[in-house]
Image (cartoon, helix red, strand yellow):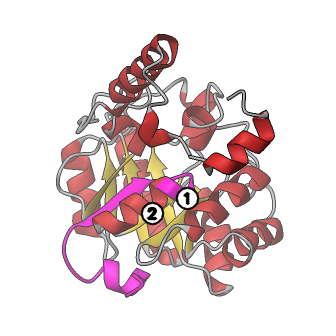
Amino acid sequence: MKKTVATITAGEKITVLTAYDYTTARLLDESGIDVLLVGDSLGMVMLGYKDTLSVTVEDMLHHTKAVARGTQSALILADMPFMSYQADVSEAVRNAGRLVGQGGANAVKLEGGAEISPQVRAITNAGIPVMGHIGLTPQTVNALGGFKVQGKTLETARKLVTDAKALEDAGAFAVLLECVPAMIAKYIADSLAIPTIGIGSGKYTAGQVLVIHDIAGLYREFTPKFVRRYADAGEEIKNAAKQYIKDVRSGEFPAGEHTFAVPEDVLLQITGGHA
């Protein structure tokens, strides 16, 4: 059965992984994952940007469509990219509607706290589920002064609590907490009626999210402290490519089982008996 906002928030710990293409989405969907996040992290791990700020709505639509084609049961959550919702409430609703109507997403995720509550309220009023995202918000990395843990001071911790409650009041079905100290994340989780999803925020949240390229060892440029690597697919791919190169150059590939035969009479006629 297709998972929904209601079903994923009603039971066990919520599991979330990113997906950006049909093949990965299909594999992760078959694994039983609850939510596939088409994250704007695709700008870094798929498109080679230095951050997420260059990702466009068209980029998100392209990748969300691919993930939707590979998904049967997981809930598809699409990031709203930088400046697709911050400036104007009506534009936020239109762009969210495109990700759902054209892209096939089941919900959208917005970075920010109380300052974007009007957008969250308007999008949810339009019938689109919204997940909030506070703490380390990569789209505002320049304002934050880099990729830093958030909520380590009394002032910033209080702001996180205020922002989480503002998102809940605006109608968000969940709040993602990124790089928040574990006990602050626990306090926020205990303070809300809606679930929290953690990334680098400890074990007390209702669910966890990681980037598939990080847990599979595919993205080598940087591995955050909070990532556990479950495979080294990057090394496996390199080894496979090296073996392929060796086999082609040595003549071991393609072998007989990789080739197609032609009837003898056809061969004789085409070659004039000189095959």
Q: Is residue 126 above or below residue 200?
A: below
Q: Which residue is mark 2?
A: 26
Q: Is residue 30 magenta?
A: no
The residue at 72%/60% (across/down) is 61
The answer to whether marks 1 and 2 mark residues whose Cβ atoms lie closer than 8 Å is yes
The reply, left or right, for residue 25 in relation to residue 217 is right
Residue 180, image x and y in percent?
32, 42
Q: Is residue 131 above or below residue 182?
A: below
Q: Name the residue nearer the viewer: 272 or 217.
A: 272
User: Which quarter of the figure is the C terminus placed in?
Assistant: top right
Identified by mark 2, the residue type is Arg
Residue 246, image x and y in percent?
43, 13
Count the labels in the image: 2
Q: Name the residue nearer the viewer: 186 or 202.
A: 202
Going by the picture, which residue comes out furthest to the front? 273
Q: Which residue is mark 1?
A: 22
Q: Name the residue nearer the viewer: 272 or 231.
A: 272
Mark 1 secondary-structure assignment: helix
Give the magenta range: 1-23
Residue 260, image x and y in percent?
56, 46
10 Å crowding of disc 2: few (<14), some (14-19), many (20+): many
The reply, left or right, for residue 52 in relation to residue 193 is right
Residue 166, image x and y in percent?
49, 67
Q: Is residue 201 above or below residue 89?
A: above
Per the model, the C-alpha gap separating discs 1 and 2 is 6 Å
In the picture, residue 6 is in which quadrant? bottom left
The reply, left or right, for residue 9 in relation to residue 230 is right
Identified by mark 1, the residue type is Tyr
The residue at 39%/19% (across/down) is 243
The residue at 66%/28% (across/down) is 49
10 Å crowding of disc 1: few (<14), some (14-19), many (20+): some
